[in-house]
Image (cartoon, rainbow, N blue to C red):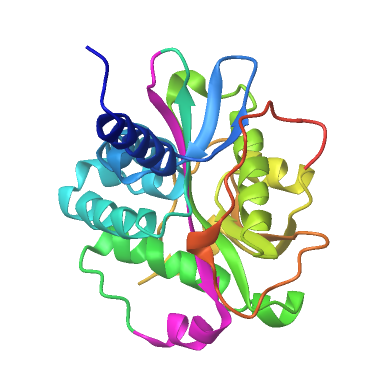
């Protein structure tokens, strides 16, 4: 039986709503992966990935064995959920299985909150998590990125995580390239983050990131104790690095909810 005009119109509206809710796809790779907006429907899956891969692989968390510390892991997870809610993060997804294989968790940082960020007391309770946050704070605090790059906001990288069996395939570099595209589309003129592994720092440098401050792991001491001792081969320091995106002019008002959608397209891995 043929549909009535009203039924057809309702169906069109439903299809349109689904398209509006669909994530923007920032990159599609020949190997069958795509990079898209990390949506709230994938938050639980992202947390599972972080617990099973990131906390066991990332230098500082691995060094203090935070996976065996439920309180510390829970604090990290709670913060990760807060970071993801800013809707500026990316998901790496297997096209065939729709499986989440990586995340790049990011938030926009504004100049107006710069002094408050480092002046307020961090509400952390677990000693291991507190030590890691103190370390990150000490790396980032000396750098006034807004003054250095003459900007009012930037996109901050909090987490770079890829499932173990997908690592060493160049995905992190391509995810960071997609993050630069996302930042540019939102008229956010810079992207920065603390990179704890030497390989990640090398990748960021290849993309044009500049090292602004670093602390050697052996020099970070609390109560006469070196906190990070099991950092892995060649991982001697964590670094705060930033990239100023060329030709991006800031708008007066934040418009993070008005990022234009992109058509699906293959990545150009030869340029940012």
Query: In the rendered image, is residue 163 in sight?
Result: yes
Q: Say whether residue 97 is left or right of residue 251.
A: left
Residue placed at 29% from the left, 39% from the top? 41
Q: Position of residue 241 (x, y in %)?
A: 67, 59
131 or 211: which is nearer to us?
211
In reply to whether residue 54 is colored magenta, the answer given is no
Image coordinates of residue 107 in percent, x first then y, are: 48, 61
Queried whether the magenta region covers residue 113, the answer comes back as: yes
Residue located at (69% from left, 46% from top): 204
- Residue in the picture at 71% in, 42% down: 202
From the viewer's side, name the closer residue of 205 and 90: 90
Q: Is residue 27 above or below residue 86?
A: above
Question: In which image quadrant can residue 203 be found?
Answer: top right
| Rendered view: 185 above or below 100 | below
Outermost residue to the left: 70
Give the residues in magenta.
97-120
Q: Is residue 170 left or right of residue 33?
A: right
Q: Nearer the viewer, residue 56 or 93?
A: 93
In the picture, measured across the screen, residue 69 lies left or right of residue 269, that is: left
Quarter of the figure with residue 155 = bottom right
**85 is higher (above) or lower (below) than 62:** below
128 and 162: which one is in front? 162
Residue 138 is situated, as x and y percent measured from the top left of the image, at 51, 72
Task: Name the residue: 75% across, 79% down.
Answer: 150
Locate the C terminus and report the quarter of the image it occupies: top right
Residue 233: image location, x then y, percent: 58, 35
Image quarter (top left, top right, bottom left or bottom right) of the N terminus: top left
Say whether residue 225 is visible: no
Number of marks: 0
């Amino acid at each position: 039986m043929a549909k009535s005009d009203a039924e057809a119109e309702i169906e069109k509206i439903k299809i349109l709503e689904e398209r509006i809710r669909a994530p923007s796809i920032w990159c599609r790779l020949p190997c069958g992966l795509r990079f898209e907006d990390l949506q709230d429907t994938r938050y639980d899956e992202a947390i599972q990935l972080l617990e099973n891969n990131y906390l066991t692989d990332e230098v500082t968390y691995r060094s203090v064995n935070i996976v065996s510390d439920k309180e510390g892991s829970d604090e990290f997870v709670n913060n990760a959920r807060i970071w993801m809610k800013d809707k500026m993060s990316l998901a790496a997804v297997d096209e065939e299985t729709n499986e989440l294989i990586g995340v790049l968790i990011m938030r926009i940082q504004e100049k107006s909150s710069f002094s408050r960020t480092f002046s307020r007391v961090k509400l952390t309770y677990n000693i291991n998590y507190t030590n890691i946050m103190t370390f990150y704070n000490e790396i980032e605090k000396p750098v006034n990125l807004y003054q250095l790059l003459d900007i009012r906001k930037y996109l901050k990288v909090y987490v770079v995580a890829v499932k173990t069996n997908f690592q060493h395939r160049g995905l992190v570099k391509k995810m960071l390239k997609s993050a630069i595209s996302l930042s540019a589309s939102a008229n956010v003129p810079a992207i920065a983050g603390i990179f704890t592994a030497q390989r990640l720092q090398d990748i960021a440098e290849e993309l044009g990131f500049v090292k602004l401050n670093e602390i050697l792991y052996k020099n970070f001491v609390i109560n006469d104790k070196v906190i990070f001792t099991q950092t892995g081969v060649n991982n001697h320091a964590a670094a705060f690095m930033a990239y100023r995106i060329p030709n991006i002019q800031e708008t007066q008002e934040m418009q993070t909810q008005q990022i234009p959608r992109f058509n699906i397209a293959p990545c150009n891995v030869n340029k940012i």
